[in-house]
Amino acid sequence: MLEEKYYPNKELFKDARIKNMCEYKDLVEWAKEDYEGYWGHWAKEKLNWIEPFEKVLDESNAPFYKWFVGGKINVSAQCIDRHIDSRKNKAAIIFEGDRGDKQIITYLELYRNVNRFANLLKNEFGVKKGDRVVLYMPMIPEAAYAMLACARIGAIHSVVFGGFSAEALRDRILDAQAKVVITADGAYRKGKPYMLKPVVDAALDGGCPSVEKVLVVQRNFEDVVWIGGRDYSYNEMIESQADVCEPEVMDSEDPLFLLYTSGSTGKPKGVQHSQAGYILWAQMTMEWVFDIKENDTYWCTADIGWITGHTYIVYGPLAAGATTVMFEGVPTYPDAGRAWKMVQEYKINQFYTAPTAIRVLHKLGEDEPKKYDLSSLRVLGTVGEPIDPPAWKWYYEVVGNGKCSIVDTWWQTETGGHMISPIPSATPVKPACATFPLPGIMADVLNRDGSSVEPNEQGLLCITKPWPSMIRTIWGDDERFKKSYFSDVVKDGKPVYFSGDGAIKDEEGYITITGRVDDVINVSGHRMGTAEIESAIKKHPHVAEVAVVGKPDEIKGESIFAYIVLKADTDDTLGEEVELTKEINEVIATEIGNIAKADAIVVVPGLPKTRSGKVMRRILRAIAKGEEIKQDTSTLEDPTIVAKIQEAVSCANC
Ligand code: WT7
């Protein structure tokens, strides 16, 4: 593949930490030759240890790897305390609300707010090291305080995205056996208020015996039901808390947080991250991939409910001593210029968002960015899904004015931080390509037997050596951890981490991600398991069978397409079907949340199954796309079903 290459604008990257490809290659070589020496060096240089570690990597119980064994550390101290001497008056968080309200929080203020919050949890609620605390929060500074307060006292936080339903929230509270839930009364989106506390109430009404207390950040929303002895006001309690709380001494490998994510089968998995390895890589990638400088203002548009919000709004920027912008709203409200207006106003230097947002902003206002002064920008990042070349070019040419570096960062909830990404100061970039593994990350494109695939052929994207910020296990389910990530690909007799993504490596080593090869759908950069959506749909009383697949979508990357078979006694006249579609989406909204609603729900007479009863999803994906069926259908239990499904889909489309 001989695509055009884009080289870094050296003027913008003076004093970069990795200046060119020679320096990049030196680091890569160093890691190859002396893996433990390499990581041990960075862990000593970048982190402030309470007690030093004795061993860099313990592989004796693979794949349950241990990093920086014996080391003692506190992540909140990494993010706050160590900056107090040199940065106490620097903005740590710049908050902008949906309605345009603003707040700047300095590192000293952050220190006090987090310490008070930590004292509240510890002294008033009795939260101890190892206890789980669920956060169901909007994008407000208190969400970051809550995460850091948990880290300070050694509690394990589990943030649940505010768009998940009460049922989904309850599942996560139950799985984590959380002692405390932290929420807010409500929030704003596109100028309209929406409530969070009632969702928590509904989740707990369904029975969550582990939850003792609910802490509510009050933003003056009315009509909030208050349950005495369970619900407490953050606003009333916080003022009286002492503003110093000694950071708990944590072992490198103690869990820092859980974050639930979807897999190809079953319920969401509680991805468990550790202390030292996670914060090390969060900080290093922040410095390398975003070229963070002392006076920079950095903005990531994600929500803290996802890993991007954890690593690249809260932990990474703060560990690096940077100024991080936290935005409650959406970049398209009140108009398509909102994001660009904020870039102009705060003189944003690094802007990080999802390809879906870029496609939407492009569509809404091709020339909109030109109305604003975006000259402060140096690095433009993308994350969450493959970016298509037209979106990439618009981002590069119109938003970045042809001078910024674009970093297409590939990583996952499980990887904790970036794995494959350009270094903006060094890497010659090919459009829509994640380029090379970061130094120290052994990513490769393999066959199932661990051999390398031929250049330009698709293979499985794997990480062949453990890395510090990797998932440690699935909360409470070590077997599922092994099976989910270390059972598909074996190299040199050892199982290696398989991401679930397909990728292509060209002859120069550039890696392009092609998307999930398992039953996971990526809608607007949000990861959704088909199994989860299917089990939600099955709750509808008329549904006998269901299969969900992803259909390519111009804006969202993929959309959710559901095939359903009705129970025999159901009236399936067309009028009924429209009603049914609505009902099914309501069931999905109740069970999971609005983000998992299907774009198409088609009633079919049956599903294409093999004689052993396996649903051939590949056929269903092809039909959803309107493609010709290339697969051999003669092995199906009922080969005539394919034409019948095609007909049902074309009827539903007309
Ligand atoms: C999945 C992980 C990582 C933070 C947000 C999503 C897809 C992620 C890219 C990229 C192509 C990407 C993959 C991956 N993905 N980044 N730059 N190019 N695809 O985290 O919810 O854990 O999802 O997102 O399919 O497996 P996540």
Image: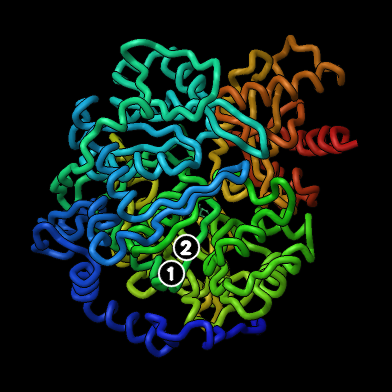
Residue at the far right: name it: 654
The answer to whether one can see residue 95 in this image is yes
The answer to whether one can see residue 500 in this image is no
Residue at image point 56% right, 67% down: 347
Q: Residue 368: x, y in percent?
A: 76, 62
Q: Residue 472: x, y in percent?
A: 28, 49
Q: Is residue 229 above or below residue 329?
A: above
Amino acid type, mark 2: Leu
Residue 629 relative to residue 259: left or right: right
Instruction: For label 2, count other residues whose C-alpha is less than 10 Å away and answer few (under 14), some (14-19) or many (20+).
Output: many
Residue 460 relative to residue 385: left or right: left
Q: Is residue 271 above or below residue 39?
A: above
Q: Which one is in front, 223 or 628?
A: 223
Q: Which one is in front, 45 or 608?
A: 45
Instruction: For label 1, count other residues whose C-alpha is less than 10 Å away and answer few (under 14), some (14-19) or many (20+).
Output: many
Check the picture and name the quadrant holding the C terminus.
Answer: top right
Q: Which one is in front, 176 or 603?
A: 176
Residue at image point 30% right, 53% down: 108
What's the mark number on residue 344? Answer: none
Residue 633, by quadrant, is top right
Residue indicated by mark 2:
461
Residue 216, by quadrant, is top left
Residue indicated by mark 1:
444
Residue at image point 38% right, 50% down: 485
Residue 467, by quadrant, is bottom left
Pointers 1 and 2 in contact (CB under 8 A)? yes
Amino acid type, mark 1: Asp
